[in-house]
Amino acid sequence: MITIEEVIKKYQSQAFNLVVVILALIIAFKIYEKNAAEVALLNQSKDTQIEKNIALEKISKVNQEISAVKKFINQKEQDSVINTVGDIAQETGVEILSINPTADEKNSYYTKFFFDLALSADSYHKIGKFISLLESSQDIFNIEAVSLDQQSDDFERGNNGESKKISVILKLSKVLAK
């Protein structure tokens, strides 16, 4: 009969090899877990960076659009104000008596150019249409102040002695983005 000692001697080297393989598997599994956690962190970091890059691309596109809008707004020079106001006045039947640029108001984001306009018209409707078209034009115009009065020239008077013309003084501003 075979004794326990003989069995142990016979299988001792195989048992030792089995224990070494099991230990090696445990160590390899621990190393794999550690590396898998690092890979997961790297993938998460990569995903975060991809999201940041997408956000930066969107911001860049928005900045380009803002620059294009600023360029469009600023391409209109002060001289074009006179042309635009003149075209609107001609369209509405309002007579421009004078256009005078006044002091500018500078801000860190925009510059406001002011103009004093003296106008004359046959009716309040023409003046209203002029102001409406002016404020709804593609240029950014604002009416800062309006003063209305009747002209009192004797040769302009109608049959009942009332004035036919209305005198208007406007303070107009145009905004240019920086």
Image (cartoon, rainbow, N blue to C red):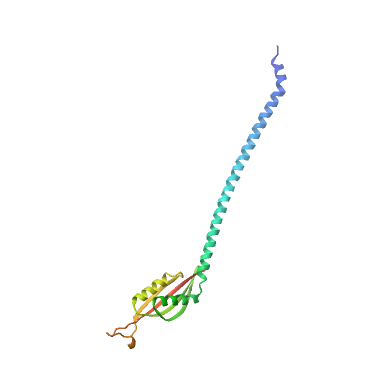
Whole-percent x, y for residue 26 in the image: 64, 32
Outermost residue toward the left in this view? 160
* Residue depicted at 61% across the width and 40% down the height: 36
* Residue depicted at 36% across the width and 76% down the height: 126
The relative height of residue 20 versus residue 153 in the rendered view (above or below) is above
The image quadrant that residue 61 belongs to is bottom right
Outermost residue toward the bottom in this view? 154
Q: Which is more toward the observer, 21 or 111?
A: 111
Quadrant housing the N terminus: top right
Is any part of residue 40 visible from this angle?
A: yes
Whole-percent x, y for residue 113 in the image: 47, 74
Q: Which is more toward the observer, 62 or 83?
A: 83
The relative height of residue 157 versus residue 7 in the rendered view (above or below) is below
* Residue depicted at 43% across the width and 78% down the height: 116
Is any part of residue 107 visible from this angle?
A: no
The relative height of residue 42 versus residue 136 in the rendered view (above or below) is above
Outermost residue toward the top in this view? 1
The relative height of residue 30 versus residue 97 in the rendered view (above or below) is above
Whole-percent x, y for residue 40 in the image: 59, 42
* Residue depicted at 35% across the width and 78% down the height: 148
